[in-house]
Image (cartoon, coloured by chain):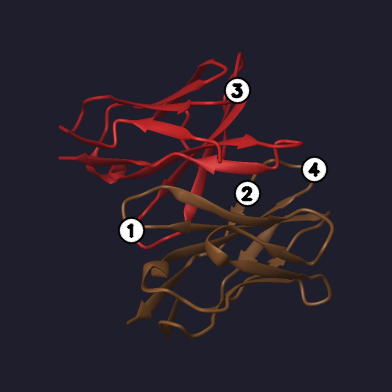
Chain colours: A red, B brown
Amino acid sequence: GAVVSQHPSWVICKSGTSVKIECRSLDFQATTMFWYRQFPKQSLMLMATSNEGSKATYEQGVEKDKFLINHASLTLSTLTVTSAHPEDSSFYICSAPLGRPRETQYFGPGTRLLVL
Amino acid sequence: AQSVAQPEDQVNVAEGNPLTVKCTYSVSGNPYLFWYVQYPNRGLQFLLKYITGDNLVKGSYGFEAEFNKSQTSFHLKKPSALVSDSALYFCAVRDGGDYKLSFGAGTTVTVRA
């Protein structure tokens, strides 16, 4: 199946710093990618849709100035958690759709963020 | 609006026994249905999907699922469970005209040796 990578897999940072997470589609192009957040033993919550060449669309209640998304190329989307605080600690997962018509989402391995 | 319900938080079965993980959905248009599996501290792995065609869908690792339109269900099944099937399983749905997925709460499957 399609491969989506994320980097880093783990990050620990101090409160107030910014953290950038990369999501790459390794063997296909993705004009759209999705960013999710997952709390322990809970389901995935869609944060935003990343669109290549245009602004991301955020779900209700997600602060766009807090979670900056840039879809710089057809294979790369980045999520930057700005001025991170302990409540931002979570598991962040990206996905990219593939197939006809891009019906199946393939997920990255996730990034565990811990803000101290 | 679209939503998914996974009525069981946990399913426990003995190795070699059949495994069923339940899922019901609600969607306004044509449902695209998916099953994913997640191992600890990992992303989601795609198992199978129903878009159109045969109601019985076969997927990875011996899993299958049956689409039942009248009951709005898409239960995941495996005839003979393995210990390595122990994981968190998510059912997801999207409206055919929208890329956004809605996930169920997840079902933790434990297969005991």
Residue B61 spot, x, y in % from top left:
52, 61
* Amino acid on which the number 1 mark rests in the picture: Pro
Task: Quarter of the image for the N terminus of chain A: give it.
Answer: top right
* Amino acid on which the number 4 mark rests in the picture: Gly
Nearer mark to the viewer, of 2 and 3: 3
Task: Please tell me how crowded label 2 is: few (under 14), some (14-19), or many (20+) other residues with Cα within 10 Å.
Answer: many
Residue B70 spot, x, y in % from top left:
84, 75
Q: CA distance from mark 1 to mark 2?
A: 20 Å
Q: CA distance from mark 1 to mark 4?
A: 31 Å
Chain bearing mark 4: B
Residue behind mark 2: B101
**Sequence order check, earlier mark of 3 and 1:** 3
Chain bearing mark 3: A
Position of A66 with respect to B33 (left or right) is left
Task: Please tell me how crowded label 3 is: few (under 14), some (14-19), or many (20+) other residues with Cα within 10 Å.
Answer: some
- Say which quarter of the image contains residue B48: bottom right
Q: Secondary structure at mark 1?
A: loop
Q: Are marks 3 and 1 on the same chain?
A: yes
Q: CA distance from mark 3 to mark 1?
A: 31 Å
* Amino acid on which the number 3 mark rests in the picture: Gln
Residue behind mark 1: A40
Q: CA distance from mark 4 to mark 3?
A: 21 Å
Mark identifier at residue A29: 3
Q: Which residue is depicted at the point 60% across and 75% down? A: B22
Residue behind mark 4: B97
